[in-house]
Amino acid sequence: MSAGPKVVGLIAGGRQFPVMVARGVKDAGHRLVVAGFSGHTNPEVYPLADVYRELKLGQLARLVEFFREHQVQEAMMAGAINKPGVMDIRHLDARAVKLLFSLKGRGDDAILRAFTTLLEGEGMAVVSPQSYAPGLLTPPGVLTRRAPDEREWADLRAGALMARELGRLDIGQCVVLREGIVAAVEALEGTDAAILRGCELGGAGCVVVKVVKPGQEERVDLPSVGLDTVRLMAKAKASCLGVEAGKSLFFDLEATLSVADKAGIAIVGLDQA
């Protein structure tokens, strides 16, 4: 990134990440233009913006027009978005429909790559949001006081292989399993729903594995975990979490590990081998 001030466009979703990124942009002395979505964006991001506009999901032409109007030089995406809402064709404008139906595959990564290409075609450099919120990447190794037992290690290894194969097909990033038996794979519903479904089917002691898709567009959609993930796992009686080290985002690391330790959940930063 150049040293001088610039205009940065943030496509903001839910939870804390877009707020952290927005603060980083402002701390760096840049002008912040925020595009949010009604019912999806964390409203705490709006006061940090120099200018913002709240859109409806699927209004791609208006989003691009808004960024062009304010001469956005760098664009990025941060925060959770309801994927079923994005994919509901009834809510898509003509430009979004054209983009969607131009794709051979319509998985998350294919759509995000196409969207990234579209923004770059408008003269905006697409950058990684963690460049403005560093220090969030998952560390390697056993992170909790309790290490996984032999069965959990076996499930972690098997789950990582399965999740990468699913990612290769651009289906999802997360697998829930127990004793080598897959109870749930993440698809359109997202990680939280996959964990709940998997633990309901697999019972207490399920292992949750979340990894980066092979060849994933890492500027726009890294997997993430944090307090909400572990609290949900504790509620669902999952016993172990494996998340890819060095590429996945881990929010509220110390607080999350404290909750995991109290619940007896083992957490591991998985290497990429």
Image: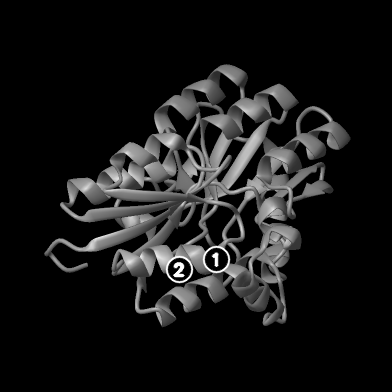
- Name the spot of residue 215 as percent of width and height, x first: 56, 73
In contact (CB < 8 Å): disc 2 and disc 1: yes
Could you tell me if residue 134 is visible in this image? no
Identify whether 13 is placed above or below 255: below
User: How many numbered marks appear?
Assistant: 2
Which amino acid type is shown beneath numbered disc 1? Answer: Leu
Q: Quadrant of the N terminus?
A: bottom left
Q: How is the image coloured?
A: one colour
- Name the spot of residue 172 as percent of width and height, x first: 69, 58
Q: Secondary structure at mark 2?
A: helix
Could you tell me if residue 185 is visible in this image? yes
Q: Is residue 32 left or right of residue 64?
A: left
Quarter of the view holding residue 162: bottom right
Q: Which mark is residue 64?
A: 2
Q: Nearer the viewer, residue 106 or 123?
A: 123
Which amino acid type is shown beneath numbered disc 2? Answer: Val
- Name the spot of residue 45 as percent of width and height, x first: 38, 40
Residue occupying image coordinates x 58% and y 49%: 81
Q: Which mark is residue 88?
A: none
Identify whether 212 is placed above or below 117: above
Q: Is residue 136 left or right of residue 173?
A: left
Residue occupying image coordinates x 61% and y 60%: 58
Q: Which mark is residue 60?
A: 1
Q: Quadrant of the C terminus?
A: bottom right
- Name the spot of residue 242 as percent of width and height, x first: 60, 44
Compute the Cα span from label 2 to label 1: 6 Å
Residue occupying image coordinates x 75% and y 44%: 176
Quarter of the view holding residue 89: bottom right
